[in-house]
Image: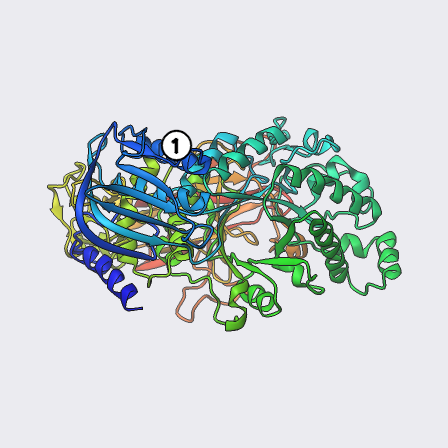
Amino acid sequence: MARFAQTIGWMLGAIGAIGVAPVAEAQSMSPAKPLAVLPLPASMAAKPGTLVISSGSAIATPPGDAEAASAARLLIAHVMTTRGIMLQTGKNDAPIRFVRDRTITGPEAYRLDVDATGIRIAAASRNGFVYGAMTLAQMLSPDQAFGKPVTVAGVTITDAPRFAWRGLMVDVARHFQPMPSLYKIVDQMAAVKLNTLHLHLTDDQGWRFEVKRYPKLTEIGAFRSPPSTGGPAPTTRVGGFYTQVELRALVRYAADRGITIVPEIDLPGHAQALVAAYPELGVLGDRPAVSHDWGINPYLLNPGPKGVAFVKNVLDELIAVFPGSYVHLGGDEAIKDQWQRSPQVQAQMASLDIKTENALQSWLIDTFGRYLASKGRRLIGWDEILEGGLPSSASVMSWRGEQGAVDAANAGHDVVLSPDPMLYLDNLQSDRADEPPGRLKVQTLAAIYGYDPMPKGIDAAHARHVLGAQANAWSEYLVTPYQMQHALFPRAAALAETTWSRAPRDFASFANRLSPQVARWRRGGIEVADSAFAVGYTLRGTRGDALRTGKATVALATQVPVGTIRYTLDGSAPTPRSAAYATPLTVAPGVTIKAAAFDADGIATAKVRDFATSRAALLSRTPSDLVACPGRSFGLRMPMTADAETNGPAVNIGVFDTCSVYPAAPLDVAGGFTVDVARIARNFGLAHDTADVRQHFRVTPYGELLVSLGCRDTSGRAAAKDAPPTKVIASFPLPDPATAPTRMTFSATLPRMTGDHDLCFQFTSPAEGPNYAPLSVQLTERR
């Protein structure tokens, strides 16, 4: 324990010497050069001596050791990409040597020694060699001096992970991801010692795994039509699938990088693509289209002999492609209405003496779990498989909070923590307007870093059943590789540290070590979100206050304590020599503030963001500036087109009511408004929540946009005792969706009032038709 405290103290002391300050509004930070190792090793002790590594430096591996040779090739590739220097294989006198050491215990453990005589990576296993190589790759690319030799300080690193399961889930079912993107993700997972890639291969919206015995699964089930936004039905097809040959190659590639791929075939729910291909495997005999609706759809697998035989046949082909221990069989969000309405299913339940549909699902999961066990594999499923009784053969992936993991672990089942929203990476990373589509719950880098995947409710005697944690990137709104990578990185690094390292959490240390890793990822061709490093702006007081007083006071901040914020007020881009931000800025309306944080090397940590204080800008609102009407909530940021492959405009909406508020509109200043409206697809699978969709009586064929002064909550009461009476000040009939464009503008005058007041924008379009939402609201000054 003393040795551990000493080495941790040395590491954090080195970081502290950099001058990292706590996060604060002033953000007076001095990052300099942080330690470049991420995740933080178990033990790291400085020693005398340094060694210079440059192009031409050699690597030696034990003769005939294929695993060490593979790790050496991986090291060469990563160092070439991240540093621009070409290492080469050599003989025993090479400065970098891989050594097989059977005394190092643990399948992923390694030891790395650096002194003036050389660098030695010792391990007893393939994955130990891989992780030692990845640590060294980071040490050889600590800064921006691309192509230059590196001086490596003497050190001894002894390292092994905290958890065995350190995972990312990529949902390729909702939106198909091309194979080259998966290879990139695998490479960059390995760089930070993540070791499990969970591929969500089937869902209502697509079947992505080629099954030779059932070719219609991919001929029909892999493609769907886009949802309609009105007008003629789309004729294009969206989708794709992976051949078994392609997936075998990906599995081998991942294994060489210490990564196991866990396939998921989602059953018995989320089966609409399956039933579209083979309706006889459904429950009621109908043939739906492959779904384009996100959420929960009613289609289930037929639990009878034919359905069971089908799944076993699919599993035979699946496990022949994916050799890992675990197969994921979903089990989530399987509403049981089709089973309840099927005489055949009810008869099957009676013959098996099964009392409930949840118990029938448990019987199915147990059947498949025992079948997998007979093949030497293990079943894992989402925590709904706990309902109806957890089969003895199953492990649990807990997504509905942590309780599923607590219950399963205490009952002796292995668990993986994957709670929503904490580890759901399709949630946004900031509340800025430039965030791409996704779920509106903001999950920051700091929040994920602060999550501990060992729930307090698990008894100490059962803590060994916690395999680890996994972050999920559901792809309803992640259409392209760019968007998928933007969601995964850099937040994957926070998960990597919390699942690998046992060291006490230190976000400032992590953030400084993350900066060079972001640069490495980008050199590897990965899109990395800069949300955590970007400057955000907060206006003090209301916009009306700024317009009335002729002064705008704006605070600047970033999410991470990295870099010094520098800004300009003359419209030019900030540089490392621009003014350093210290306290909120007070400017006259008309000034545009531009700012970015710069590290000690003068490198901007994110793209420049700006904040305009012109009178027109202060009178405008984007979807991110609008709020939900009283009694409602926004849940999604949606693109204009569900399958758009460009990063275009997006709107914030509530699933159950289309109502937005322009808060604190200065009606003593504004004399009118123009609202830019988008018509978008209403492609939600709401299942039993359909009744919660608020219907509005419309007085024109396609509904109206009603703009009111003040808002009321869903029960019709005033939003607050001092709120002004709700008064409709403008109404606009919505055009025929079959013929009108998907964007439209409406303008009107505003009543003269004093002070600030909310403006409510309510759409009364029919719930069975497309959705509407404001893309922007611009107030115009009263003449």
- Identify the residue at horizontal 53%, vertical 44% (top origin): 260
Count how many numbered circles sit on residues in the image.
Answer: 1
Q: Quadrant of the C terminus?
A: top left
- Give the image location of residue 547, x and y in percent: 23, 52
Where disc 1 sits, the SS reads helix
129 horizontally vs 576: left or right: right
687 horizontally vs 639: left or right: right
Q: Is residue 53 above or below residue 299?
A: above
Give the image quarter of residue 515: top left
- Identify the residue at horizontal 71%, vertical 55% (top origin): 365
- Give the image location of residue 191, x and y in percent: 38, 42
Which scheme is used to colour this image of the protein? rainbow
- Give the image location of residue 360, x and y in percent: 77, 58
- Give the image location of residue 228, x and y in percent: 60, 35
* Neighbourhood count class around disc 1 (C-alpha, 10 Å): few under 14, some 14–19, many 20 upward: some
- Identify the residue at horizontal 33%, vertical 36% (top origin): 522
Give the amino acid at mark 1: Arg
Q: Is residue 275 visible?
A: yes
Q: Is residue 76 above or below residue 298?
A: above
Q: Is residue 457 above or below residue 198?
A: below
Give the image quarter of residue 6: bottom left
- Foreground of the two, 363 or 557: 363
Q: Is residue 435 visible?
A: no
- Foreground of the two, 239 or 678: 239
747 horizontally vs 376: left or right: left
Can you identify the residue that label 1 sits on? 73
Q: Quadrant of the N terminus?
A: bottom left
